[in-house]
Amino acid sequence: MKKKTIRDIDWQGKRALVRVDFNVPLDDQRQITDDTRIRAALPTIQYLLDHGASVVLLSHLGRPKNKVVDALRLDPVARRLSELLGRPVKKIDVTTGPEAEAAAQALQPGEVLLLENTRFDPREEANDESMARELARLGDIFVNDAFGAAHRAHASTEGVARFLPAVAGLLMEQELEYIGGAIEHPQRPFVTVIGGAKISDKIGVIDNLLGKVDALLIGGGMANTFLLAQGYRVGDSLVEPESVDTARALLRQAEERGVKLLLPVDVVIADAFDNNANKRVVAVDQVPDGWRILDIGPETIRRFSDEIKRAKTVIWNGPMGVFELPAFAEGTRAIAQALAEADAVTIVGGGDSVAAVEQMGLAERMTHISTGGGASLELLEGKELPGVAALQDA
Ligand code: ADP
Ligand code: MG
């Protein structure tokens, strides 16, 4: 269902209460080490200011566990946002209540206020109605631009939307259009590449996508459990014995549906989980005891890349190997390169996959890089996100 967006509203003289995802990484000096998420919210904030609104911003940061944690106050975020917007950003130390209401009411069109970390309030994650009502007093219209938090039904994402007209911000709209669009009406061939550590994290995704894709390429640690299900020995590789039956069922389903499912045919193995370990490339039926699979091999890279290069839509979630160790990053790098070169809509989701693509300097060459790991996974599972469901239909 398409949702209303900020472009459907006349903002002149209105106060926008905007949930953003400013959950940025901080170092121990409380310096922001990556401001991608702040930058991602700028188009929405700028649009609102340009159209005569005042803007009240709401975000969580980190995991303060329902209490005030000084190290997780949003002051560094306010400073960076102010630099990026080139205008003052007022920051207050409360999220709701009389002080917040007074500050919100004092705002003039074109002014920006940032409230304190929503997760300092124990009512946030409980999606408590009293907090949602208090938040609703801070704006005329609620805007949800926090895609990265949209899979959570919290007071500032879902609850508040019941008490104000609620629309999507531009980042939210873009994420839904790219990821939702790719799943619902992909240009074909539609290829999905799934990797990462654990099959149990992504069973829902594989299950949902099996019914939609032309080819499913599986690498990374999770491929080991599929190899085990096919009867191969995988030595000391990361496996999930409790998921072997599930892996077998998914393989059977793929076959019944005529979906091309590709697993590694060769792998990079090592005798320790260490960048300087001894390593070799072997066929998947040649993994000796005491060795572990840490990356996909060159023949697998070639086969996966061929599929990707023929595709018109590619979704990628999960690294192909332990890319944090340079000795085992080649599979992930090569797949990122194949996406970068593909003449296709290319979408990358998942925190580690996005980090890998950025580390490799290929982010610019993807069609869309998702800002929400958990939220993008739930979209790929075919779920409706509570923070999206609560918005007005277009
Ligand atoms: P994403 O965040 O992109 O969704 P995941 O969190 O599912 O990805 O998985 C990323 C992790 O998977 C990385 O830390 C990586 O080291 C690990 N991984 C990938 N391949 C293997 C492997 N063969 N053995 C062990 N860990 C692996
Ligand atoms: Mg991850």
Image (cartoon, rainbow, N blue to C red):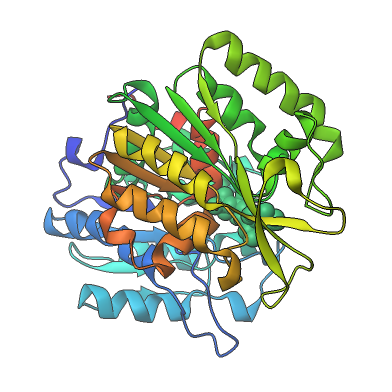
Quadrant location of ligand 1? bottom right
Which residue is at a point 49% across and 69% down the rendered structure image? 24
Q: Residue 309 at x, y = what percent? A: 31, 39
In this view, the residue farthest toward the top is: 256
Residue 106 in the figure: left or right of residue 216:
left
Residue located 58% across and 29% down the image: 206
Q: Position of residue 85 (x, y in %)?
A: 23, 73
Which image quadrant is residue 77 in? Answer: bottom left
Image position of 18 with respect to 7: above or below: below
Image check: 161 left or right of 184?
A: right
Q: Residue furthest bottom?
A: 29
**Residue 98 seen in the figure:** yes
Q: Nearer the viewer, residue 337 or 44?
A: 337
Residue 177 visible to an observer of this rendering: no
Image: 300 above or below 210: below
Residue at 86 percent of width and 34 percent of height: 242
State the residue at coordinates (45%, 81%): 76
**Rendered position, 84 above or below 14:** below
Give how far across and how far down residue 25 sits, in percent.
52, 73
When asked about the image quadrant of residue 326, the answer is bottom right
Residue toward you, 162 or 19: 19
Q: Position of residue 252 (x, y in %)?
A: 67, 16
